[in-house]
Amino acid sequence: MRGTKSRIVGLSIAGALALSLVPLPAMPADATSGGAVTTSPAPTATPTATAEPAATATPTPTPTPTPTATAGDLPKPLPTSSPLPGDEDHEHLETDGPTMPLTRELPTRTVDPGVPTVPTTRLSSSYGPQPVFHFPWAPGKRWGASGPHADSDGIHEGAIDFAPLGSSTTVVRAVAAGQVYRVSCAGGWFLGIDHGGGWMSEYYHLRSANSALVGKWVEAGAALGLAGQTLPCGGTPGSSPHVHLSILNEVVDVPSGKRQYIPVSGIQFDRYELYDSSGAYNGVWRDMSGARVLTSERVTCCLTASTRIGPSSPKAVLPDANGNGIDDRAEVNPWDTDLNSDGRADIVAFDTTGVMVSRSTGSVFTTATRALSSFGTETGWSTSTSLRTVMDVTGDGAPDIVGFGGSGVFVARGNGSGGFGSPSRWTTAFSAGSGWSLSGHVRTLADVNGDGLRDIIGFGKYGVSVSLNTGGAFGAPRRWSNAMGGEAAGSWDTTRHQRFVRDVNGDGRADLIGFGASGVQVALSTGDGFAAPRSWSAAFGLDRGWRVDVTPRQLTDMNADGRPDVVGFGRDGVYVALNTGSSFATARRWTTSFGLSSGSRGWQTTRDPRVLADVNGDGRPDIVGLRTGGAWVARNTGSAFTSAARWTTDYGSTEWTLGVMPRGVADVNGDDRADIVGFARHGVHVALSTGSRFGAASHWNAQYGWGKSTGHWLVRTKPRGINAG
């Protein structure tokens, strides 16, 4: 059990309810072990044993597989209420919940592993963002549900009853991730979960409640016990087994001795929201389009649980190997969406009219505001013909918007606070009108002459052209290399050859790096041209089986020496070739996980995004893989990756649809640890990194979703992204 326990009687709090959102940190998980290093860089090598834990190895039960999302998943609206089958006399009173005085045994919260900093007795002064709540039973199963009601120790209707009725399962599961605690009374105890940000859920009437979970972190869907009629702390049992679920927040201002219920009317569970109607236990359940699907009078049958929050089939409409919703062709060098340079990544989105932004406060994303009425589809910008990126090209440190359009390259200067000036055309070159296309040419921005300003680099038919940045315009393009281009310059192709522009030798000038047939070619910048390409590695080439769409390769500094290294996601694991400053060293396999053939299903670019990001704040990028079952992390030691461990059961590829629901990995609260940001159907979900796991997913913004009620944001028409640069 992590941390010491302290006892709080009554859990009362003075003062008015604050409206700002400040999440509390979650408890760390156990460390993982290291992975082996081998020396074969070929992706076709025979796979070795994968380090990925099997689903059955996790300490929490694996949920029932999610059903395909179809119209049939949603219960049809019921013309009349359906009371508990076979139990017309089923009756609940306002004493359904506990009636005895309660003592909550909340474990000490921590910020960093093993360092208690926020004792339980110090209550939060404001709400954290609401956790993403699931139903407390297995996906695919149908249970009955009541409407909101209050208990004898509450002044708000913060409780709901859920009953398995005729379901084949009676297991009660955690509605969100968090740390389990015990609520005790003179007659016994029951379980609660601290989700962070002041949010708690409590589960009454359980039989066979798992006391071994007390003090431990559990994921959403973890089995807590069985639906029952037990009365350890008083109340009434009802007429059939059920769970009495209470939602609380420690900031709610209630009289002494009362529990701090949050009114559950309007709170989302899975794909539904509950709304109060007249009388206790009566309510209306609506789907996210607002349609009535169940009218509850007492416990009424039935709602279907599902972890799926997106369409069932991936929509691979754009190249997007890391699944963040940003076209890889617009991310040869990454976006930087920290618009006000506060160390927290913000949201930048392109809609029909122009540019929308939401800044991170560290605990939520602000309401979307119109930052610019340009670069939208109504003025001719589209994901199929236009390249839009976010990075500083003026040299003032504030990210700007740069768009490669039909008649040239346009720049809108960032003002450093989330706004942008009117766009101006900085050059007529590199445009669709002059023959450049997304499918045929690579275009990006990097400082190739060492003056601190990003220049345009375009890989065209005859080689590589450069337009130098003057600070207010891009100069006339000039060919800097006759290599790494189209059919007249080596026959490099965007579908077969990855090309990057990074400073590989530390002289302050960005160089060309190309993954060709025979390995990695590098052309160093001289400040006014690129030298002839030279082989820096015989690995990672087409001749050894590496493919853009199957075995992606990236450039990033893996050992914190300031030089970008090669990272390749091969067939049997992840290979790294460290940069010596004059070549890439022998490629070594740093982990057997995350490869095309790793594990029982393998990792596929069209289904399972893999991202390199520093999630524990040590300055070295780790692997974050999003696949069925959640997010898996392998930490970077500087010479290998640790064994892959599941850091959260949220954000998995079964629940989140690639091409529809982007997931980015970026630091959004400024603690130097990358977090997961997911664009769901009805808003933005965030799971903060503690350094050893991701905390409970929570709602940070009710916009930017693919549902019509939140803007109908689709990757193929209205891209939105988040990145720390």
Image (cartoon, rainbow, N blue to C red):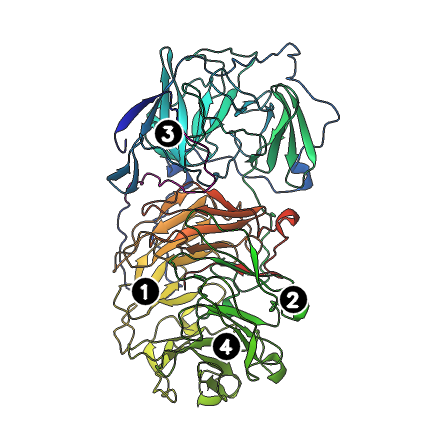
In magenta segment, residue 22 = yes
Q: Amino acid at mark 1?
A: Val
Image vertical order of residue 478 relative to residue 372, above or below: below
Q: SS class of the residue under badge 3?
A: strand
Question: Is tag 4's residue or tag 1's residue first in the polypeptide sequence?
Answer: 4
Question: Is tag 1's residue or tag 3's residue first in the polypeptide sequence?
Answer: 3
Mark 1 in CB contact with mark 3 (< 8 angstroms): no
Image vertical order of residue 236 relative to residue 315, above or below: above
Image vertical order of residue 15 relative to residue 259, above or below: below
Q: SS class of the residue under badge 4?
A: strand
State the extent of the magenta-drawn residues as a range. 15-31
x, y percent for residue 370: 58, 60
Q: Label 2 vs label 3: CA separation?
A: 48 Å
Image quadrant where one finds the N terminus: top left
Q: Amino acid at mark 2?
A: Thr
Question: Is tag 2's residue or tag 3's residue first in the polypeptide sequence?
Answer: 3
Q: Label 4 vs label 1: CA separation?
A: 26 Å
Residue of label 1: 576
Mark 1 residue crowding within 10 angstroms, few (<14) / some (14–19) / many (20+): many
Residue of label 2: 377
Q: Amino acid at mark 4?
A: Arg
Residue of label 4: 443
Frontmost of labels 2 and 4 is 2
